[in-house]
Amino acid sequence: MKRTLKPLKSARKAYSDDRADNSVKLYETENDLPGNTRAALCQLINQRLVDALDLQLQLKQAHWNVKGPHFIGLHELFDKVNEAVASYVDLIAERVVQLGGIAEGTVRAAAQRSRLAEYPLDIADGAAHVEAVARALSTFGREARNTIDLADELEDADTADLFTEVSRGIDKWLWFVEAHTQATK
């Protein structure tokens, strides 16, 4: 399900209505953000967490299965991007816990809730993997930027800053991947 940015004042409602059970377990914390804000943030950040886990596994899929004349370069690039995304996964999960929430980082959660398109399992050619990886990075980058805006609406500069860092990194890796298809004319 694609969520568009809601007008200001509706970010809390958008993320409190996002789950059928409409509940988020929060631990006691001295964090000074209000409980309803922390709950909305935890839902938002957990959505990015499952997206990031899916992205990480898609990168490994490309890394393991790439073939063709640029095999070694792409094989190594996809692994480096995967390592960077693994560090983003950890930052994202830890932010949920810092807010008193529970990081929902299982493979099953990722499979059920990721907003990334399914990675094609029947490709081998390096160019096809570059295209699929670029699409996944682009989607995740867009969602990270949406998260920055929503975190700002929820008045959490720390989460917005975290996703600014993630977004900047994803844009760099997207550039590295897309450079394989961009030739000078």
Image (cartoon, helix red, strand yellow):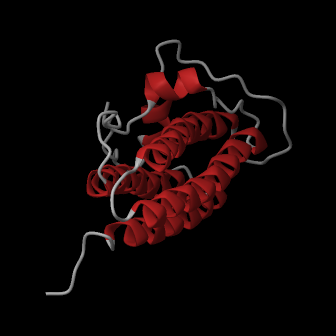
Q: Quadrant of the C terminus?
A: bottom left
Answer with the quarter of the image where residue 114 lies: top left
Q: Left of 28 or right of it: where is 49?
A: left
Compared to residue 178, the image places residue 87 above or below, namely above
User: In front: 185, or 56?
Assistant: 185
Compared to residue 23, the image places residue 39 above or below, namely below
Examine the rendering and report whether any part of residue 18 can be seen: no
How many discs appear? 0
Compared to residue 95, the image places residue 77 above or below, namely below
Examine the rendering and report whether any part of residue 6 can be seen: yes
User: In front: 22, or 146?
Assistant: 146
Q: Residue at x 40, y 50 (%)?
A: 66
Compared to residue 140, the image places residue 54 above or below, namely above
Q: Left of 37 or right of it: where is 183?
A: left
Q: Residue at x 77, y 44 (%)?
A: 98
The residue most toward the left is: 185
The residue most toward the top is: 21
Q: Residue at x 42, y 50 (%)?
A: 140
User: In front: 98, or 63?
Assistant: 63
Q: Left of 31 or right of it: where is 47?
A: left
Percent x, y of residue 100: 76, 36
Answer with the quarter of the image where residue 80 lies: bottom right
Percent x, y of residue 95: 70, 47
The residue most toward the front is: 69
Q: Quadrant of the N terminus?
A: top left
Q: Left of 89 or right of it: where is 149?
A: left
Percent x, y of residue 77: 50, 63
Percent x, y of residue 70: 37, 65
Q: Residue at x 47, y 63 (%)?
A: 72
